[in-house]
Every structure is written in structure tokens, then in C-alpha cells.
Amino acid sequence: MAKLSNTQVGGVLTIDTAVISTAGAGFQNMVFYTTGTAATWTMPSALQVPGAKFKVTIVGGGGSGGPTSVATAYVSGGGGGSGGVIVVYLTVVSSVYTATYTVGAAAVSSTFTYNGTTYTAGGGGSGGTGTGANSIAGGIGGTATGGTLNYVGAPGGRGQGSSSYYSFPIGGNTPLGFGQGGLKYNLNTGGSVGTLGYGAGGGGAINNGTAATHTGGTGGTGLIIIEY
């Protein structure tokens, strides 16, 4: 909010333009991590000010797509669930200028700990195994609680077995990743990695009966973004 000065000119208050130039500017810097286990983040000196605000986005790893286990035509495993996503706005506490974080690999939770509180975005669940039966379950979405905003992960698409049609067991999406990129539509190759972003579920494997086992796609890795 702009601050009005206490200088009065002809009965009209003048405006402090120096304050206006920075008002509403929001966060000016960002760092992000795609790997790290129990790693330490040290605040830059500009942020080491009690009462300052910073924002953390935490994405859990996506679940793997389900495999196939029988040599049956049109069988597919379920798609992997996407990781949960948490957005949390935090306030700098005096003398607490470090935080720890873990970026989840596929299907693994991501965490961020500051001032004794840990925020966790859960990893997505793996899709069910294609056995020739219909309605193979997709993986469940990762959990998300305790943040300012919480996005529970999306479930993976269902796998199926049928003699007449294919299913498309895509992985679940996140706001930063799309599970559609985790599926290969050509047969007998399984799924591919959920590469179109972070935390997306991998695609379920598909076969046409010429081989018994194909591996589902690996989910996308997690992510941590810090803005200040």
C-alpha cells in the first residue's frame, strides 16, 4: 500500500513515490530444486529479515504406471497417480535462516522443513497390474495437507483387458506436469517416463498379447520452488 506523507501542500497530501515504486512488486527471486535428500537451503542475506515473507511450492513424485502380467490381447496396467502439491507462504523468524528439504523421486514424497514444521507433498501411488481383467485401478493421488494451498494428486487412468478395444491408462496430472506424456501408444513397449513436467504419473503398460510382461512408465520426479 502506498504511504501518504505528512507534508501538506495547498490542502492536498503528497504521495511518497519511493514507496509506490515497490508497492505490489511481489516476489522478485526464485530458486528451485529437482534433487536433494535432507539437504539444507540457506536464505540469502536479503531475506534474513524477521517478518519477511517467502513462498514455497512442494511437488511430490508421480507414481509409476502399472505393468502387464499376462500374454492377453489389449491388456493394460493402470496409470500412476500424480504427486500432491502444496503451496505455503512463510514468515522469516529471527535467527532461523536455514531450512531443510527433500525432493521426492518417482512415487516418493517431497518435504520442506522450516522453524520446526515439516510440510509434505505425498508421492503418487502406482497403477494396478494388467491381468486381462477389466477395470484395473489407476494409482491414487499423493496427499497434500498443511499448506496455504493444498492440491491432492490426481488418480491415474484405469487399465483394462478386452478383446475388442484398448484403454489409455494415462498418469495423473499436477499443476506442473502432465501424465499424458507418460504413455506410449504403440503396443508391447510399456509406458514411458512422465517427462512433461514434475510429479506426473507414469503411463500404464499396454500389450497386444505377444509378450506377457511389460513395465509401466516411471512417474515424474518431484520439485521444490522457493520464491522471495
Image: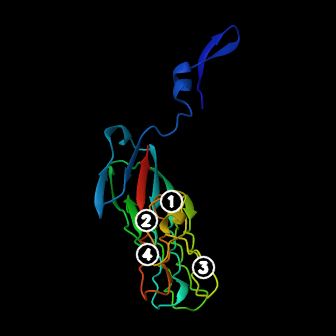
Q: Which residue is mark 1?
A: 177
Name the spot of residue 51 as percent of width and height, x first. Answer: 44, 44
Kind of residue sitting beneath label 2 = Gly
CA separation, marks 1 and 4?
22 Å
Name the spot of residue 161 as percent of width and height, x first. Answer: 58, 87
Return the disc, 3 or 1, that comes first in the chain's sequence.
3
Which residue is rendered at x = 42% and y = 82% of the image? Answer: 214
Any part of residue 33 in sight: yes
- Residue 220: give its label: 2
Callout in the foreground (1, 4) = 4
Kind of residue sitting beneath label 1 = Gly
Q: Which residue is mark 3?
A: 166
Q: Say what secondary structure mark 1 lies in.
A: loop
Kind of residue sitting beneath label 3 = Tyr
**Which of the 4 quarters of the picture holds residue 153?**
bottom right
Q: Which residue is mark 4?
A: 189
- Residue 59: give its label: none
Q: Are circles 4 and 2 on residues that touch, CB within 8 Å?
A: no
- In the displayed image of the protein, which residue is found farthest to the right? 11
Q: Nearer the viewer, residue 213 or 35?
A: 213
Name the spot of residue 20 as percent of width and height, x first. Answer: 56, 25
Callout in the foreground (3, 1) = 3
